[in-house]
Structures are given as C-alpha cells and as structure tokens.
Image (spheres, helix red, strand yellow):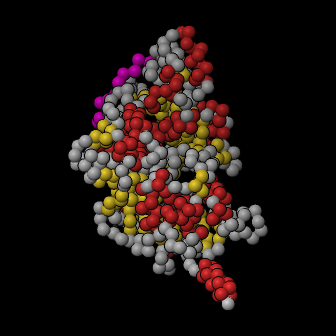
C-alpha cells in the first residue's frame, strides 16, 4: 500500500508540474535565462547578461508591467537600444505570445532588421528555435517580413509604407528610430499614430518607442519623453552617495573625471560606475514610462573616447557637433539663430586673385532648369569642406533648343585656373530634372555620365537622406539620384552660419565683377528659413520661402553640395599630400590625384 501511495503521489506531482502555469518572469529575467547573443550581430556572443548594462533592467521590466501601456526610450547610440527591442520580441514569442509589429523608418530597414538581427536570435536562442518554423519549409508562415509562432505572429513594417502599417490588430507595437520616420505614411498620416490604432482592441496593449533624438521642437521621441515619467539613470557619488544623472557639463577634460553636483568632488569613470544605479522619475506617470540615457552610462564606450569624439566634432563644424549631441548625449539639437542674414554674407565677400583660390581642391557644379534659361553655380571645395563660390552663371534661351545645352556643355568643360597656373575641371555636376524639360535633361546627362554629369530630382520631407541610391530612368536609361533637399538645405544653412574663416564648412564668396555674386544672389541664397509646423498635432520641419524672392541660388548651392557628396573625395587627404603646394615638381602628382577623385 505504501508503494502504491508513493507512486500515486509522484503521479500527481508530475501532473501538477505539467498543468501548472510557468513561473512569472519579467523580460530581463527571461533574457538572462533564454537569450543567446549571436556572433555576427554582437561583439560579446553567448549568454545574455542584463547586469552587463544594468540600466536596461528597468526598461525591460517596464515592458511587462501591467500598469504600463507605453515605454519611451530617448537615448544616445551605444547603449543597447536594439537589444532591448530584441529581448522584448523574444519574451513575447516564447513566454507571452501575442501579435507583434516592429516598425522601422523604411521597408528596406525592416528587411535588414529581420535578416541581420531577428533571424540570428531565433536561430541561436534554444527557447525560440522551435517556435518559428524554417523559412524554407512549405506553409511555414515565415517570410522575411512576417513570421508566425504558436499564439501569435510578428510583422516587420516600414513607416514609409502605409499598406504595411494598416494591417491586422496588433497587441505589441515596437517603433524603432521614430525620429527618422517620415511626417506621413503616404497620405495616411503620422506613422506612429497610424500603427498605434492597431492596438486599441487589446486591454493589455503595449507600445515601445525608441530613438535617438534630432531637432528640438520637431523630435517625436522628445515629445513622447516629455509626456512620460521622464526617468533618468542615476548613480551615487562615490564620496557623498547622492544619486544624480551623469551629465556632460560635469565632465572635466583634463583628467576625464566627473564632478559631483552635490559635494563637488571629482571621480573617475570606474569609481562612478562601481555604484549601484537606479532610475529616478521626474514626473508621476504610471501608464507612460520614459527613460533617457547618454553614452556616459554605457559599458561599451569609455569616457576618454567620448571626450575625444566631442573635440573632433567641435573642430569639424556645426554639422558634426549636431550629430555628436544627438548620438552621444541623446539630446535634441537646438539651432543658434533662426536665419542667416543676407547682409552678413554680402559683407563677407573677398577679392579672388585668380579663377580659383589656392585652397580649392575640387570643383563641383549645380544646374537649375527654368522655362527660359539655365542657371549654374560652380563651387570650389577645400579641406574640412570649406567652400568658395566660383561663378554664378545664367545661360539665357529656351532649353528645348539644342543651342542652350551646347553652351552649358562648353561651360561645364571649362578649365579653371589657380594663380600658379594649375588648372582644374569640374569633378561632378548635378542637374535638376524635376521641373522643366525633363527629357532634355536626361538626354544631356546620359551622354556625359563619363564626366560625372548626373540628373537629380529633389524630394522634400523629414528623414529623407541627402543622397539616395542611384537608379536608371525607364526610357533614356539615365543615371538619376534622388536628393533629400531638406537635409541638404540644413547642411547649407549650418555652413553659412560659420563665422570664422578657415573653420570646417566656412563659405567664401567673391567680390570680383562678373562672378554673379551680387545682392540678388545673396537674397536668393537666404530666401528660405526652417520653421516647425504642426500637422494633425504632429510637429514637422518645413522650409518656407520668403514672398517674392527667387530661391534658385539656394537650390544650386544644394545641388553643388550634392555633387560633392556623390563624388566623395577625401579632401583632407588631398590637402595633406600637397595638392595646394605651389611646386612645379608636384604638378604631375596633383594631376594624378585629381583624376583619381
């Protein structure tokens, strides 16, 4: 009887184990137990350890908190944002199955995420390996952008594709790099709002927004963070033990230490990071928890490296400094001054002693096509992308007639000479094909691609890269580049604001007659300003033109800048090897370098 009783007890214990619910796990606990990092996507492959970056625990566990509906992460690079998303996906696939959608800025980026990040995690984490069937198996429900698993599915979508967002109901929405989303998904409206509507039928819905911020006042992630609990990762001072966030203003460059804002003592990176950190909210908000991080908290980025990168960015000009503020501090960039004044640029003009000043290493050009003329600007570029306006030129005539294009061809083939007699030709030209006489532009450019004369078409809007991938037109087979003109205008304007000659990006203009740089030119160059407007409650950056002012000079400087980015010479290296040295023995070397650009 005793044997039978023991067998019965073991049987019941076995039954209880089989039918009992799994132990309650948070996302960080699941990751520590089940996540494996893949060698092709991680510098530290193997078992996941949340303690490697302890600030991630609070973020991960907020995602599975029943009181929390939205999690916002506004952060720098190098803090593990992508791993937070991957751990969340793994948790919901394995432990809490649900319909999931991950939204990337573009459909191409969604495909890359699926192939390069998600697929290795599914393959290398044993807890996930059997959940999603092999993509090659018949009726697997597994494609590049859609994967099914018991109890749910995951869809990867692009914020630029309204069709991929407006699909089935979704319980868990993961929005990655939201500041790079377009202002509208086609004509459907704000992508974040659009995909969020898919979660309304679920009482336990989750929305995770992650991004490095961009421009103050137009940053989606900053706006979302400001409406959240606004939590900061704080560490105790090694001396007084007062908790505080690690801020850039507390860093001392000489010995790379950080000053306590309470007791004033300086301590090293190792001393600060030895403390046990915690998230401290600035506001009470149980439904929306927001987290801000900068690279000072990262275990993968040393403070001395961050300081070095800051000094390099500061020396590199406004554009590089903006990138550093966004990606290292995880903070929005606020422009100093609203607009460049034309009078300031007119007074800056100087006299050139030759066609091109000695600092010029490369020439590019931009061409705008109007109904009764072509307008051209030739720009010289030097080390640090310092620029010189060389010639602003009009070719009057009907662009439907071959004579106008013959004159343009001769102008673009001209040799421009320096004071020492050394001559240069234009390395690359961009011609706008988006307005008048598109066919004529394509034909002209197709026959001259060997001279790097390319057709371009401008596309406005936030998040569009300055230089898009080259394509071919259907009929003429002409090379065509799509330009993110708003991004280009930001670059041009930031360089015009540089005040000190010789600094990276500084813009020179000639006083010489017949160069085309009169007051009308500068009125056109400063004809637009950037404003923040709200569309259906969503802030977006727009460029607004002054009434009654022509903006061709701004467009042409944009196109000439794009031509430089397309040819992409190493200007600093060209300067180093002596391209500007006035030495006859160097001329052969200079010609070789010029041809090799």
In the rendered view, tell whether residue 248 sits above or below residue 418: below
Residue 345 visible to an observer of this rendering: no
Residue 44 coordinates in the image, percent (x, y) = 56, 48
Residue 463 magenta-highlighted: no
> 572 or 367, which lies in front?
572
- Region of the chain picked out in magenta, as a range: 341-354
In the rendered view, tell whether residue 426 sits above or below residue 566: above
Residue 260 coordinates in the image, percent (x, y) = 26, 45
Looking at the rendering, which quadrant does residue 289 occupy?
A: bottom left
Residue 342 magenta-highlighted: yes
Residue 263 visible to an observer of this rendering: yes
Taking 209 as reference, is 131 left or right?
right
Residue 31 coordinates in the image, percent (x, y) = 54, 61
Taking 194 as reference, is 519 left or right?
left
The residue sitting at 23% across, 43% down in the picture is 264
Residue at the outermost left position = 263
In the rendered view, tell whether residue 226 sits above or below residue 408: below
Taking 590 as reference, is 330 left or right?
left
Taking 563 as reference, is 392 left or right?
left
The residue sitting at 33% across, 44% down in the picture is 248
In the rendered view, tell whether residue 317 sits above or below residue 158: above
The residue sitting at 61% across, 81% down in the picture is 13
Residue at the outermost front position = 2
Residue at the outermost bottom position = 1
> 95 or 540, which lies in front?
95
> 463 or 258, which lies in front?
258
The residue sitting at 61% across, 20% down in the picture is 592
Residue 67 coordinates in the image, percent (x, y) = 40, 74
Is the N terminus in the top left, top right, bottom left or bottom right quadrant?
bottom right
């Amino acid at each position: 009887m005793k044997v039978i009783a023991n067998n019965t007890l073991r049987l019941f214990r076995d039954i209880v184990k089989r039918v009992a619910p799994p132990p309650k796990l948070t996302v960080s606990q699941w990751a520590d137990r089940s996540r494996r990092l893949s060698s092709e996507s991680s510098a530290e492959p193997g078992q996941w350890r949340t303690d490697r970056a302890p600030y991630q625990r609070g973020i991960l566990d907020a995602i599975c908190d029943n009181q929390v509906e939205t999690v916002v992460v506004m952060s720098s690079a190098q803090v593990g944002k992508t791993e937070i998303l991957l751990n969340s996906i793994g948790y919901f696939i394995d432990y809490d199955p649900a319909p999931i959608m991950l939204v990337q800025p573009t459909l191409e980026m969604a495909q890359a995420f699926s192939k390069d990040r998600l697929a290795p995690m599914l393959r290398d984490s044993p807890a996930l390996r059997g959940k999603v069937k092999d993509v090659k198996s018949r009726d697997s429900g597994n494609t590049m952008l859609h994967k099914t698993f018991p109890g749910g599915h995951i869809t990867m979508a692009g914020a630029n594709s309204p069709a991929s967002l407006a699909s089935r109901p979704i319980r868990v929405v993961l929005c990655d790099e939201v500041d790079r989303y377009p202002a509208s998904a086609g004509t459907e409206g704000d992508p974040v709002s659009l995909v969020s509507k898919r979660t309304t039928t679920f009482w336990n819905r989750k929305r995770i927004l992650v991004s490095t911020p961009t421009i103050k006042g137009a940053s989606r992630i900053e706006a979302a963070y400001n409406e959240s609990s606004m939590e900061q990762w704080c560490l105790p001072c090694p001396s007084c033990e007062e908790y505080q966030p690690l801020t850039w203003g507390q860093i001392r460059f000489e010995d790379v230490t950080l000053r306590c804002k309470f007791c004033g003592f300086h301590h090293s990176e190792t001393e600060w990071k030895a403390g046990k950190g915690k998230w401290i909210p600035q506001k009470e908000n149980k439904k929306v928890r927001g987290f801000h991080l900068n690279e000072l908290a990262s275990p993968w980025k040393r403070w001395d490296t961050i300081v070095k990168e800051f000094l390099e960015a500061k020396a590199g000009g406004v554009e590089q400094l903006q990138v550093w503020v966004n990606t290292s501090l995880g903070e929005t960039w606020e422009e100093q001054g609203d607009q460049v004044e034309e009078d300031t640029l007119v007074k800056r003009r100087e006299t050139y002693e030759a066609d091109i000043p000695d600092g010029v290493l490369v020439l590019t050009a931009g061409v705008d096509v109007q109904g009764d003329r072509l307008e051209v600007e030739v720009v010289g570029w030097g080390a640090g992308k310092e620029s010189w306006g060389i010639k602003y030129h009009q070719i009057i005539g009907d662009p439907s007639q071959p004579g106008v294009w013959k004159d343009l061809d001769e102008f673009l083939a001209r040799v421009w000479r320096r004071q020492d007699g050394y001559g240069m030709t234009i390395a690359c030209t961009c011609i706008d094909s988006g307005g008048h006489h598109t066919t004529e532009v394509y034909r002209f450019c197709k026959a001259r691609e060997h001279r790097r004369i390319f057709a371009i078409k401008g596309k406005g809007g936030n998040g569009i890269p300055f230089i898009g991938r080259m394509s071919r037109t259907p009929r003429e087979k002409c090379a065509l580049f799509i330009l993110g003109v708003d991004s280009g205008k930001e670059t041009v304007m930031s360089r015009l604001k540089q005040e000190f000659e010789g600094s990276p990006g500084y813009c020179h203009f000639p006083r010489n007659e017949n160069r085309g740089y009169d007051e009308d030119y500068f009125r056109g160059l400063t004809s637009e300003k950037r404003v923040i407007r709200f569309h259906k409650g969503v802030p977006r950056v727009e460029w607004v033109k002054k009434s009654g002012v022509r903006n061709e000079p701004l467009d042409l400087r944009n196109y000439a800048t794009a031509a430089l980015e397309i040819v992409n010479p190493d200007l600093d290296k060209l300067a180093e090897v002596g391209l500007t040295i006035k030495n006859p023995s160097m001329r052969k070397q200079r010609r070789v370098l010029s041809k090799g650009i």
